[in-house]
């Protein structure tokens, strides 16, 4: 059974006030018995309680910096909570920041293997998916070239093709629906919907409020690391649009 349960989950980052300081600044601050580079606590998430059960499609919306992607990374296990309880039942497949992490001097074929292993594939399982990934990317002979010579669009094509070559149980998606150029976008959208049909539980983050409304059964509105509203998609999306002074989405 797939399920995500959070009980008063919070996440606080501790960061240095300055990325770097000069030796002079260090000595002056120490002379006056001040911390040379004080630690600042940033409260990214605060008291998030949430229960998502098998069969649900949850959409998450909010302004930039509201905590949407951070919450998704907590669910994926990238950031452990600093407070509260997180329980996830089921295998997670994550689709976010898909164009990062390529080995630039390796060929497209080699990167299919590398990224496949990072997604939990084995040499045997990725071998069966190798040609379907290549065919979907439509990169042809470019797969024989080092990735450093790819355009940004080619990297996105390859990354998306690899990332979506999975049979998801719990699917976490962050802004992947806008991937690629228009020609590739249509095909990518169809694949995303096929994945969503197979997944037993989905959490989707996007600024595309039409897609959020149409694909979700329930929507969460995040605001400054907290849940501001949760409920029926049309109601929550329209409340968010009202708050930013934007026109409501037509029925």
Image (cartoon, grey):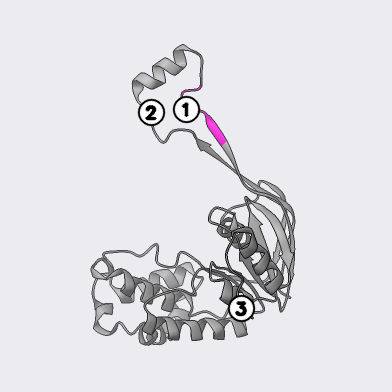
Residue 170 placement (x, y as % from top left) = 63, 73
Q: CA distance from mark 1 to mark 2?
A: 8 Å
* Of residues 8 and 144, the one drawn nearer to the viewer in this rendering: 8
Circle nearer the viewer, 1 or 3: 3
Residue 191 placement (x, y as % from top left) = 50, 84
Q: Disc 1 vs disc 2: Cβ atoms closer than 8 Å?
A: yes
Specify the segment rendered in magenta. Answer: 35-40
Q: Secondary structure at mark 1?
A: loop
Q: Main secondary structure of the magenta part?
A: loop
Q: CA distance from mark 2 to mark 3?
A: 52 Å
User: Residue tagged by mark 3?
Assistant: 250
Q: Is residue 239 left or right of residue 130?
A: right
Q: Quadrant of residue 61?
A: bottom right
Q: Earlier in the sequence, mark 1 or mark 3?
A: 1
Q: Is residue 67 left or right of residue 180?
A: right
Q: Residues within 10 Å of mark 1 (few under 14, many from 20)?
A: some
* Residue 82 versus residue 95 in the image, above or below: above
The single residue placed furthest to the top in the displayed view is 31
Q: Is residue 36 magenta?
A: yes
Give the number of the disc on residue 132. none
* Residue 68 versus residue 113 in the image, above or below: above
Q: Earlier in the sequence, mark 1 or mark 2?
A: 2
* Of residues 224 and 32, the one drawn nearer to the viewer in this rendering: 224
């Amino acid at each position: 059974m797939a399920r995500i349960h959070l009980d008063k989950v919070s996440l606080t980052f501790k960061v240095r006030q300055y990325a770097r300081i000069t030796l002079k600044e260090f000595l002056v601050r120490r002379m006056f018995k001040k911390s040379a580079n004080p630690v600042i606590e940033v409260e990214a998430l605060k008291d998030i309680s949430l229960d998502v059960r098998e069969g649900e499609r949850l959409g998450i919306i909010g302004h930039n910096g509201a905590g949407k992607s951070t919450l998704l990374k907590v669910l994926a296990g990238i950031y452990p909570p600093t407070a509260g309880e997180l329980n996830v039942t089921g295998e997670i497949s994550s689709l976010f920041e898909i164009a990062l992490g390529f080995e630039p001097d390796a060929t497209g074929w080699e990167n299919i293997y590398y990224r496949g292993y990072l997604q939990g594939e084995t040499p045997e399982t990725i071998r069966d998916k190798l040609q379907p990934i290549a065919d979907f990317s439509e990169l042809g002979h470019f797969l024989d070239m080092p990735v450093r010579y790819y355009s940004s669009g080619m990297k996105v094509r390859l990354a998306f093709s690899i990332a979506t070559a999975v049979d998801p149980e719990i699917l976490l998606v962050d802004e992947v629906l806008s991937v690629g150029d228009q020609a590739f976008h249509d095909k990518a959208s169809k694949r995303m919907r096929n994945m969503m049909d197979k997944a037993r539980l989905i959490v989707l983050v996007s600024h595309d409020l039409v897609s959020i409304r149409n694909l979700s059964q329930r929507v969460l509105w995040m605001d400054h690391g907290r849940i501001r509203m949760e409920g029926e998609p049309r109601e929550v999306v329209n409340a968010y649009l009202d708050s930013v002074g934007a026109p409501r989405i037509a029925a």
